[in-house]
Amino acid sequence: MPYHEAKEHAPGRLHALFTDPYSAFENDVVERRLHLRVALRALLDVPGREGRLTLRVLHGWANGEADPQHLAHSDHPLTRRGDLLPVVAHYQAAIDEQRPLPGEAGTLLAEPLMAAIATAEARGQEIDAETRANPAHWPSFERGLSLYTFFKVYHRLTYGEDERYRVARCETPEGPREIHEFHLEECEFAVVTGLEGDDKSRVVLLVHAGALAPLAAFVETMLGE
């Protein structure tokens, strides 16, 4: 289904489990830990066992910067909870030894953005400098909405967010996706998954490098109980 505007705070998979998932993870909720454990299992358990779960670690932005060219990442397959610990150790070693953090050759935003702009211009659409530079203007061209949606997710995971939970829907080159964001006192992360009924697509667990170790501890605590 095509989306022409941001679909944030949209119904998602967790709405089938909770009457109001937007309040289920607040600190003052009595059964908060149970809710978090149920949510994590619903989003990560089956994809992990089926080899469809990937950890994506973000880094590169700092001090308020948000240039798409400077956002870096690395991907790591997760088939069991223990797979998180070697990634944490790898990143920590790079930090301790003052080496560059792990990074993929491709970019999450810059290259797809340039490709989307080139396609729009080839079809006769004029993309001015302001549109290129301002993420809020990206939805004016095809694929720009999903790039803008993920830009906001990456920005919130890097710099923080007051809302404990939110879910957005958007079209991607791989099909429609739900983006579940968790901004908890324990850690901040997001899960990108297919819509309800899509049990074949890859699921991505997104986390900023600074929240990687807390995420590993959180997952072990929640899923190990």
Image: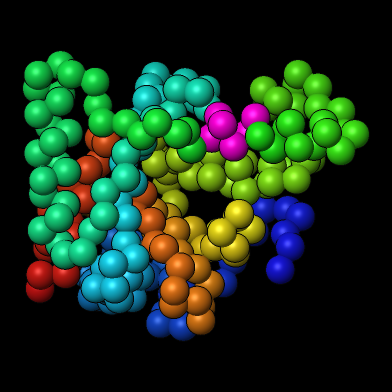
Viewport quadrant of the C terminus:
bottom left
Q: Which residue is drawn at 13% across and 36% down?
A: 90
Residue 117: tell me if it is visible: yes
Q: Which colour scheme is used?
A: rainbow
Residue 34, position as x, y percentages in the image = 23, 75
Q: Give the range drawn in magenta.
A: 109-114
Q: Is the magenta stretch mostly helix, strand or loop?
A: helix
Please tell me which residue is depicted at 16% across the width and 43% down the height of the picture: 87
Q: In the displayed structure, does residue 52 sit left or right of residue 130?
A: left
Estimate the x, y position of residue 196 in percent, counting from the top left: 51, 78
Give the residue furthest to the right. 124
Question: How many numbered marks appear?
Answer: 0
Q: Position of residue 45 (x, y in %)?
A: 27, 73
Looking at the picture, tell me which residue is in the foreground, 126 or 189: 126
Q: Pick whichever, 124 or 213, lies toward us.
A: 124
103 up-or-down from 190: above or below: above
Looking at the image, residue 13 sits to the left or right of residue 172; the answer is left
Say if residue 12 shows up in the picture. Answer: no
Q: Position of residue 68 (x, y in %)?
A: 53, 27
72 left or right, relative to 131:
left
Point 22% across, 43% down: residue: 212
Let me know if residue 47 is in the magenta part. no
153 and 196: which is toward the camera: 196
Image quadrant assignment for residue 106: top left
